[in-house]
Image (cartoon, rainbow, N blue to C red):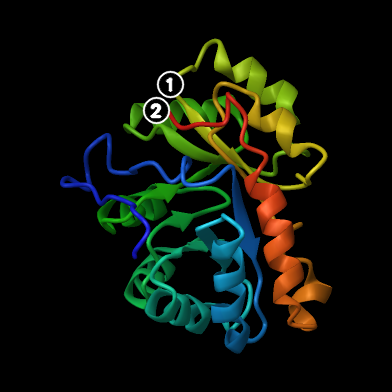
Amino acid sequence: MTSPLPRSADPSGPDADPCVLDLAPVLPVVVLADAAEAVPLARALVAGGLPAIEVTLRTPAALDAIRAIAREVPEAVVGAGTVVTPEQVDAVTAAGARFLVSPGWTESLLTAMRTSGVPYLPGVSTASEVVALLERGVRKMKFFPAQAAGGTAYLRSLAGPLPQARFCPTGGIGPATAPEYLSLPNVGCVGGSWMVPAEAVAARDWDRIEELARAAAGLRSAGGTCR
């Protein structure tokens, strides 16, 4: 069964980014050098309770990996990360990406993401960037690089004046720090790669990845929901 992730009836409207943040407490950030690893990796993550999977556009295999997961693992919600150009938006949506994540945003990139018809999380690291997106009707964002940009203290400070903004913080987060992020009222999920360690992927140790995913899926806290 395909995991639910609604599309917007009006991709240019303020709710053009249906909530990716509440599918699981952790969004796996995946870097794949070999597209043949994509399907078993996705199945292991889904089995462990992490249906949303961000495949980053950092390797030549990324598009083929997204295409394979979209075709062969329908219960996964596969998305594309490190999206930085409008051309990449077109390429990944054509490959089957069901959401988009960027480390930052420009007007042209934001327009492409908005018109893609799929949910998107533009990246921010300052209050001014958050305000600029809120002015444009975008309320769900990636906070990146989370630890380097101020971590939980910074996000907690944003919650008072900008409570309508919701975040997926990513960058430097691990199992020890994720619960503190998830306890914040303006955090829906966190992004991380600790459940897909490079050595486990290289060894194709899918059982270990499923076990790590199950532990990550158990990190949900009362504050870690999308509202």
Residue on which disc 2 sits: 134
Q: Are marks 2 and 1 in contact (CB under 8 Å)?
A: yes
Which residue is more in the foreground, 170 or 174? 174
Mark 2 to mark 1: distance in Å? 8 Å
Residue found at the far top of this picture: 160
**In front here: 23 or 170?**
23
- Amino acid carrying label 2: it is Leu
- Identify the disc placed on residue 8: none
Q: What residue is shown with label 1?
A: 164
- Image coords of residue 58 (percent x, y): 63, 72
In the picture, residue 124 is in which quadrant?
top right
Three-letter amino acid code at the position of disc 1: Gln
In the rendered view of the protein, which quadrant contains the N terminus? bottom left
Dot 1: what SS?
A: loop
- Helix or strand or loop: what does disc 2 sit on? helix
Q: Is residue 194 above or below residue 182?
A: below
Residue, x 38% and y 71% (percent of image)? 74
**In the image, which is nearer the foreground, mark 2 or mark 1?**
1
Mark 1 neighbour density, 10 Å: few (under 14) some (14–19) many (20 or more): some
Image side of residue 202 versus residue 132, left or right = right
Callout count: 2
Point 66% across, 46% down: residue: 170
Quarter of the rendering containing residue 18: top left
